[in-house]
Structures are given as C-alpha cells and as structure tokens.
Amino acid sequence: MKPKRPYLLRALYEWIVDCDMTPYVLVQVDGPDVVVPQDFVEDDRIVLNISPMAVRALSLENDVVSFSGRFSGQPFNVVAPMRSISAIYAKETGEGMMFEDELVASASTEPAETAEGKAPESDDPSSSKSGSHLKVIK
C-alpha cells in the first residue's frame, strides 16, 4: 500500500488553513536529503510555518514537501522528504497529528497509542515551549 502520511498531511493542511489558522510542521533533520536553515535546528528538529502568507511555491507531494521561505530576512529553499515530517498542527490551538515512522508501524501488530506532543506557541521556529495532545497514527 501507499504511505498515508502525504494524504493526511495535505488534508490537515487544508483543514488548518480553512479554519484561518497557521499550519506548522515538525521536521526531523537528521535524515538524508533534508534541506533546512541550520540556524533554526534544535535537537535535530525544526518547526516550520507553512502558511500561505509565510511561504511561496508550497508543494506537498507524495514523497517531499518543498517551498521557498525567508529566515532572518534571507531567502531559502526548503526540501523535506515526506518521511522526515513528524507532525502537522495549528499554531493557535495545537490541534493536529503526529506521525509514526511508517516502517515501524507496518511491522507492529499493536494498536495505535496516543502520545502527548509539545507544540510551540511562539512565531520563532526554534522555540518549543507548551503543547497540546497529538495522536500518533499508523
């Protein structure tokens, strides 16, 4: 079967934008082919604002998320393979979804568990202060 992560990511992105909220994604940067501004990486993760007002040429493909954005006033082209996207959530409410590694999930016979995730509230992508509950999916 095809991975469900890109389909869920696109659906949640659309829902968050339709609700006039700000979609953020949490990206694991320790994998290959991840291109993000390293100045904002903390603990091998970066939080990115992917709202229509914050980015240009956003592409949510089945295998990669890419866009052009500005970081500290400097333009930067971001490329994040779909496998590196750990979560998507609304900045204002923290509602969204946390993704489990699909290779691990397909090998597991256990039912999905709920996990608590911390969602940054600040506009600073490197900040991670308070949070909400995000559901881990398989």
Image: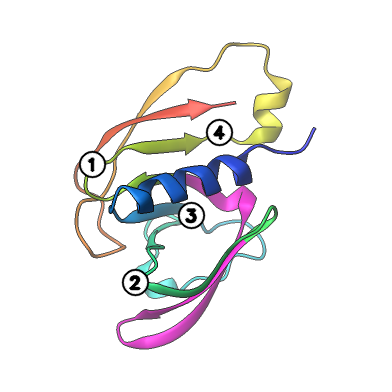
Is 107 rendered above or below residue 44?
A: above
Amino acid bearing label 1: Thr
The residue range painted magenta reads 65-87
In the rendered image, which residue does mark 2 sit on?
53
**Residue at 43% over, 86% down:** 75
The image shows residue 102 at horizontal and vertical percentages of 66, 34
Residue depth check, mark 2 versus mark 1: number of the one nearer the observer = 2
C-alpha gap between disc 2 and disc 4: 28 Å
Is 37 rendered above or below residue 29?
A: below
In the rendered image, which residue does mark 3 sit on?
27
Element on which disc 1 rests: loop
Residue depth check, mark 1 versus mark 3: number of the one nearer the observer = 1
Label pair 4/1, CB-CB below 8 angstroms: no
**Residue at 19% over, 42% down:** 130
Disc on the earlier residue, 3 or 2: 3
What number is the disc on residue 93? 1
Disc on the earlier residue, 2 or 1: 2
